[in-house]
Image: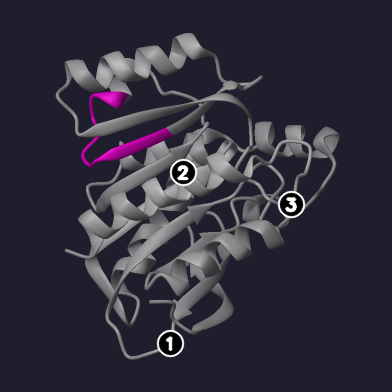
Amino acid sequence: MSHQTVTSMIQIPGPACSIRAFEARPAGSGPAPAVIVIQEWWGLNDHIKDVATRFAREGYVAVAPDLYSRLGNKVTADPNEAGPLMMSLEKPDGVADLLAVVAHVKTAAGVRADRIGVTGYCMGGSYTTLLACSSPDIRAAAAFYGEIPDDATLGRLQCPLLYVYGTEDGWIQMKDVERLRAELERHGKTAEVHIYPGAPHAFFNDTRTDVYRKTEAADAWARTLRLFDQTLKA
């Protein structure tokens, strides 16, 4: 079933500043489970807003926070600008802002407070895993080709995790993905590490013809929805 959606820009109180966010909701009274959608290094651009809207069509309240709110809400298509933006956001600050987003989502009207998931891509994939290891309120996480936290952090993972990766990723190394798989198994975590042969970094981004892989992206989307449907809609 594809839901009609209602979208808006909202402001969320944060530890350092007001956090701008894009919200997409399924039309209707709810309550509905929620998914936090975390941006790539480009900022809160139209692609991430579109992904959030896709989740709303699937019956989720989707909130995509602008992690560059501390940096003036920057959005860019230039990797020479995106890289320094990402590096200038300290990870503890990014996690603190995301925890504020979780707190907002928990109390938002029309949201099932005990059914919150998170997903993200590239930079957002890194923060997806960090948030899932930092907040007991996250019930499921789908991280796309993000950095792998250290083993001690992974030991604090409290929810099922899907980690998506392509073998031609020029940013994340296979050895770290294998470490992730081994640590998740060692700690007895509920997790799936799915690797797509030949897929490059950012293969899910359908606005980038240089890296987008339609078949792999569709499969990764199906796996994400299956995880969220099983854990957040139950």
Residue 5 in sight: yes
Q: Quadrant of the C terminus?
A: bottom left
Q: Position of residue 233 (x, y in %)?
A: 23, 65
* Residue that badge 2 annotates: 220
Give the extent of the magenta segment.
154-163
Which residue is at 24% across, 53% downward? 137
147 vs 194, nearest the viewer:
194
- Asked which secondary structure carries label 3, the reply is loop
- Dominant SS in magenta: loop
Q: Quadrant of the N terminus?
A: bottom left
Mark 3 or mark 1: whose residue is earlier in sequence: 1
Q: CA distance from mark 2 to mark 1?
A: 26 Å
What residue do we see at 43% from left, 18% from top?
177
Residue 228: percent from left, percent from top: 31, 55
| Crowd rating for badge 2 (residues with CA inside 10 Å; few <14, some 14–19, many 20+) | many
Quadrant of the image occupied by residue 156: top left
Say above or below: 66 vs 198: below
Q: Amino acid at mark 2?
A: Ala
Q: Give the structural element (helix, strand or loop) at label 1.
A: loop
Which residue does the numbered mark 3 point to in the structure image? 207
